């Protein structure tokens, strides 16, 4: 089992940072009146861990006994769809990317079912079930509208927890009907603390200097930091504060692209870079990740005078990715633009 | 029908309705908190609707002088539109008869006009049940039904024209009340069939009075400035303000004795600057929340970035010569702290565009970028890159001016 899962704190009391936030979640769980929540924050900030701990505070350890339910849903055109739903006796989980274009149907039928069913377990601590929606910002507008309707009709049997990276793509009526809970990414010292704790539990030789570098390298992403940490210990016998931290493969490839562009700005460079862009795309690295990461890697090495310009075009073409249809066009256009800027 | 125009009877009805609404004295906090306060404190009679005096008096006159026309209520969210029509219906029919005489449809609910038409048809077709003699004594009970179409401006033009026919077909036995935020989004042939009533944003005084009243009835403890903060963050939308107040009350619900100092005020946020704790065995925390609602907790619930944070960013943007490194670091932190890009952009806008020290020429350049970035964010662009771009552009402009 990965350290990530093995050492995931399970109770609110055991979470390693944002104590104030844990206290509030605990207060809500004990209030007898748990609201709908919209939990948002960058990825790797620990949103899911915090929610699972909150569920545990609401229902006890029983929520951790999860099973995969296979469910049949019927679309308006009477097609039958089968999806797997993660569930415990007390809660259900939906992830929009698992259900693709049918998120509205799934959201609607699941919520209806939960809202209309009373808790069967007489010993249950709450009379409601919780429906957790992961990646809620990926829900289609239709699905969000369906959600909104369920929220309006108050049901004592149902509470929603929406998890999202940002509130930007959540429609206003949902935002105004949920309690917004922001989960900031852990700061560097907080990541160091978590890593030190894990090292202790694994009886590994601790190295705060290295942990500090991992924290910085991870961009305040705890998931990424734990992965780097684990792979360093797996691959090396002796640990030093200055040892190299291996970036993920895709990241190394983007670094290569950046270096190639910086090394030689002749237009022919684009031919060298193109297959690498394709390579990244075929490995399911999103175009936004590529463009953003490339921009920041270039920023680390170009002259100060050029930086604003690089950001300008990075932001420009990143926007194009969302309104256009062929991502490769915009990635290449960005590369071409960068070469021209560097040429000056 | 006579009673319908009898103002005395209506007053009496209103009073009866208001009496219904009076709070019961024995009240268990536990079950009470479960009811959304916006519902619990929805004005129960027309007298109860605040800050819309003009509109309400015109509405009353309309009721007296003629048969009830179709109506169009428009105005920003949370200003009492839905409450007013519900209160009106209650005064017309009384709480019992109202159930069979009033149909509330959410236009964005069932977007197909065919569904709306079907529902209207079914509802209109059922003959009106006669009021009992007691009911007709207390309430005017006019012989038609009322159909409320909330959020009518989210209907397509086609659906709206189709609605026009439906309105005509059943005009003998039904009255429509369309509710919307933007009257300009209602097609003219539909709007011109209705008497229009404008609801304005609640003024501060009325909003404050309402909020203070609710806090008192709910026995909520709050520090000074909380009501003002609620008004500030909800810009005239009383529903929002009440919802925030209730959320804050839940958060500060005193269930565990407060052992932490009250100065810890960064509610619901991740970046409390607690000293790192030794990572010893668990459970290690005594989790307790202060029981008094703080201004900061209201802002946090509303997703508002602390003023200090914005001030730091602005000073970095004003620095000459500009420091890419400094700006980039602050932006990265804002993003990692999870603040929404829309909020960053909004607060930047407020502190730059309304700041007299920023020269007009610079403002004129800056506002164009706000437009551009808003559009890009609405298209789903990456928040980090876009905020950074905006900040660098602003810094460039301020540096030149
Ligand atoms: N003018 C008002 N007077 C009193 N309360 C109001 C008023 N406007 C809004 N409210 C409060 O806000 C809540 C929402 O009002 P509502 O009538 O649903 O707004 P709208 O339909 O205009 O969006 C109500 O429950 C009520 O508590
Ligand atoms: Mg309304």
Image: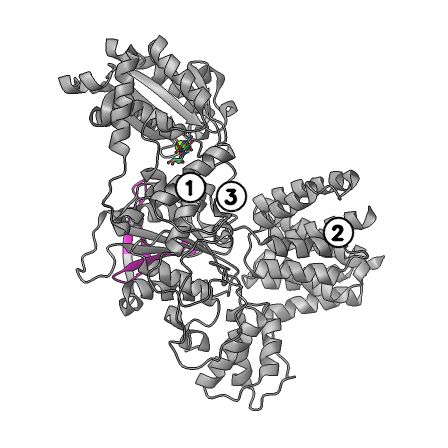
Q: Position of residue A21 (x, y in %)?
A: 45, 63
Residue A243 sits in which quadrant?
bottom right
- Residue A13 point in image, percent of width and height: 39, 71
Query: Image check: A87 left or right of A23?
Result: left
Please provide the residue range marked out in magenta. Answer: A71-97
Q: Is residue B94 left or right of residue A107?
A: left
Residue at figure coordinates x 50%, y 70% from the top left: A223
Q: Let me know if marks 2 and 3 both belong to one chain.
A: yes
Q: Observer-nearest residue: A236 or B130?
A: B130
Q: What secondary structure is found at the residue carrying circle 1?
A: helix
Question: Which residue position holds label 1?
Answer: B212
Cβ–Cβ below 8 Å for labels 1 and 3? no
- Residue at 63% across / 61% down in the picture? B332
Q: Earlier in the sequence, mark 2 or mark 3?
A: 3
Task: From the viewer's perspective, tell me whether residue B395 is left or right of residue A92.
Answer: right
| Outermost residue to the left | B133
Does label 1 or label 3 sit earlier along the sequence? Answer: 1
* Residue B49, x across and y down, in percent: 39, 28
Separation of marks 2 and 3 at Cα, in angstroms: 32 Å
Question: Is residue A133 shown above or below B157?
Answer: below
Q: Which residue is mark 2?
A: B395
Counting the numbered discs, the total is: 3
């Amino acid at each position: 089992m990965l350290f990530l899962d093995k050492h995931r704190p399970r109770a609110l009391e055991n979470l390693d940072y944002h104590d104030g936030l844990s206290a509030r979640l605990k207060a809500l769980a004990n209030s007898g009146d748990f609201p709908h929540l919209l939990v948002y924050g960058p990825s790797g900030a620990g949103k899911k861990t915090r929610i699972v701990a909150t569920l545990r505070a609401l229902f006890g350890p029983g929520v951790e006994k999860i099973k995969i339910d296979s469910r049949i849903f019927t679309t308006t055109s009477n097609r039958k769809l089968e999806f797997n739903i993660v569930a415990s006796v007390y809660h259900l989980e939906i992830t929009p990317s698992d259900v693709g274009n049918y998120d509205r149907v799934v959201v609607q039928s699941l919520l209806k079912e939960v809202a209309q069913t009373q808790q069967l377990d007489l010993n249950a601590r709450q009379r409601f079930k919780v429906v957790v929606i992961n990646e809620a910002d990926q829900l289609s507008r239709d699905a969000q509208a369906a959600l909104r309707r369920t929220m309006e009709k108050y049901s004592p049997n149902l509470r929603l927890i929406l998890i999202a990276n940002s509130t930007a793509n959540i429609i206003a009526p949902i935002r105004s009907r949920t309690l917004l809970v922001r989960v900031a990414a852990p700061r560097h010292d907080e990541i160091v603390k978590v890593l030190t704790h894990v090292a202790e539990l694994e009886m590994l030789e601790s190295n705060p200097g290295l942990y500090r570098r991992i924290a910085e390298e991870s961009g305040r992403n705890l998931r990424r930091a734990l992965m780097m940490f684990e792979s360093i210990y797996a691959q090396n016998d002796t640990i030093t504060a200055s040892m190299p931290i291996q970036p993920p493969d895709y990241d190394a490839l983007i670094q290569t692209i950046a270096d190639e562009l910086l090394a030689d700005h002749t237009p022919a460079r684009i031919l060298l870079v193109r297959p690498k862009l394709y390579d990244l795309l075929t490995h399911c690295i999103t175009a936004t990740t590529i463009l953003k990461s490339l921009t920041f890697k270039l920023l680390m090495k170009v002259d100060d005078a050029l930086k604003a310009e690089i950001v300008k075009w990075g932001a420009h073409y990143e926007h194009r990715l969302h309104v256009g249809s062929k991502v490769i066009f915009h990635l290449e256009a960005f590369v071409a633009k960068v070469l021209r800027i560097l040429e000056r | 029908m006579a009673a319908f125009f009898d103002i005395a009877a209506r007053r009496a009805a209103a009073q009866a309705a208001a009496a219904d609404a009076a709070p019961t004295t024995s009240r268990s906090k536990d079950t009470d908190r479960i009811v959304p306060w916006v519902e619990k404190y929805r004005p129960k009679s027309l007298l109860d609707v605040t800050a819309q005096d003009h509109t309400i008096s015109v509405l009353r006159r309309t009721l007296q002088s003629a048969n009830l026309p179709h109506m169009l209520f428009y105005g920003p969210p949370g200003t009492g539109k839905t409450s007013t029509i519900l209160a009106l219906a209650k005064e017309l029919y009384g709480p019992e008869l109202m159930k069979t005489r009033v149909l509330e449809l959410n236009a964005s609910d069932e977007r197909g006009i065919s569904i709306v038409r079907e529902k209207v048809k079914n509802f209109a077709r059922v003959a009106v049940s006669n009021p009992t003699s007691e009911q007709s004594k207390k309430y005017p009970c006019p012989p038609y039904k009322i159909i409320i179409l909330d959020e009518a401006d989210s209907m397509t033009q086609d659906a709206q024209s189709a609605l026009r026919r439906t309105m005509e077909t059943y005009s003998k036995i039904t009255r429509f009340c369309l509710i919307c935020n933007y009257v300009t989004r209602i097609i003219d042939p539909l709007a011109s069939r209705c008497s229009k009533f404008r609801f304005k944003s609640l003024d501060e005084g009325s909003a404050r009075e309402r909020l203070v009243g609710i806090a008192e009835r709910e026995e909520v403890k709050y520090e000074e400035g909380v009501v003002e903060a609620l008004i500030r963050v909800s810009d005239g939308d009383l529903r929002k303000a009440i919802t925030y107040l209730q959320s804050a009350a839940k958060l500060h619900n005193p269930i565990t004795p407060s052992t932490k100092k009250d100065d810890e005020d960064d509610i619901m946020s991740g970046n409390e600057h607690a000293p790192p704790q030794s990572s010893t065995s668990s459970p290690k925390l005594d989790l307790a929340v202060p029981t008094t609602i703080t201004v900061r907790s209201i802002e946090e619930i509303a997703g508002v970035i602390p003023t200090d944070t914005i001030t730091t960013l602005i000073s970095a943007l004003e620095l000459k010569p500009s420091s890419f490194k400094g700006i980039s670091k602050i932006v990265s932190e804002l993003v990692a702290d999870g603040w929404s890009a829309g909020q960053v952009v909004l607060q930047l806008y407020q502190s730059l565009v309304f700041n007299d020290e920023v020269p007009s020429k610079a403002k004129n350049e800056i506002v164009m970028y706000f437009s551009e970035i808003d559009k890009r964010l609405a298209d789903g662009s990456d928040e980090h890159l876009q905020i950074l771009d905006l900040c660098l552009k602003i810094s460039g402009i301020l540096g030149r001016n």
